[in-house]
Image (tube, rainbow, N blue to C red):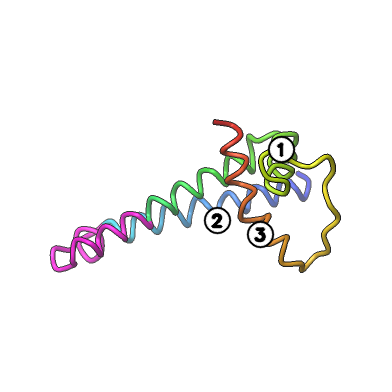
Amino acid sequence: MNRIKLGKWIMSFVLVAGAVVSTAVDSNTTHLFNPAWHPHARFHDALFLLILDATSLVTLWLLWACSRGAVRRGRYGALGGIGGLKREPRVEIGDRFRVVVAVVEPLRICWELL
């Protein structure tokens, strides 16, 4: 097993364990089903769990099933708007722009695949 595959398995374990444990811990009478909690607070707890589980699923899909070409197309689209860029710009590590790309890129990839 090479290092990339090992890294994928470790990241997959962390994603699945985090989603399952968080959902299991919050889905009881002390949190999500607590009658003493205000309904709006329970709504936000349920929304958080839904976002966490959905983000974990999308990340797992991007990690294992997504082809390299789809990720590259998504990166170009995220950097260049609707039309994309002809080439990937050189961005130094630590640049704020890279953080924006890391946030926007998964959303752009999902949008392209719809």
**Which image quadrant: the C terminus?**
top right
Question: Which secondary structure lies at badge 3?
Answer: helix
Give the residue furthest to the top.
114
Front-lying residue, 70 or 15: 70
Estimate the x, y position of residue 107 in percent, counting from the top left. 57, 46
Q: Quadrant of residue 112?
A: top right
The local secondary structure at tag 2 comes to: helix
**Circle 3 or circle 2, nearest the eye:** 3
Of labels 3 and 1, the one closer to you = 1
In magenta segment, residue 47:
yes
Which labelled disc corresponds to residue 83? Answer: 1
Q: Residue at x 61, y 46 (%)?
A: 106
Q: Is residue 60 above or below residue 67?
A: below
Give above or below for 72 relative to 25: above
Q: Is residue 57 magenta?
A: no
Depth check, front residue: 2 or 35: 35
Hey, what amino acid is under mark 2? Val
- Counting residues from the N terminus, which is met first, the one under dot 3 or under dot 2? 2
Q: Which residue does the image show at 85% across and 43% down from the upper left?
A: 87
Say which amino acid is labelled 1. Answer: Gly
Residue density around tag 3, few if under 14, some if 14–19, many if 20 or more, within 10 Å: few
- Give x and y (percent) for residue 101: 68, 55
Q: Position of residue 71 (x, y in %)?
A: 70, 40
Spatial CA span between label 2 and label 1: 35 Å
Label ID, residue 14: 2
The amino acid type, in three-letter code, at marker 3 is Val
Between 44 and 60, the one lying in front of the other is 44
Q: Nearer the viewer, mark 2 or mark 1?
A: 1
- 101 and 30: which one is in front? 101
> On the image, which quarter does residue 110 sit in?
top right
Q: Which residue is mark 3?
A: 100
Question: Few, some or many C-alpha atoms within 10 Å of disc 1 (few <14, some 14-19, many ≥20)?
Answer: few
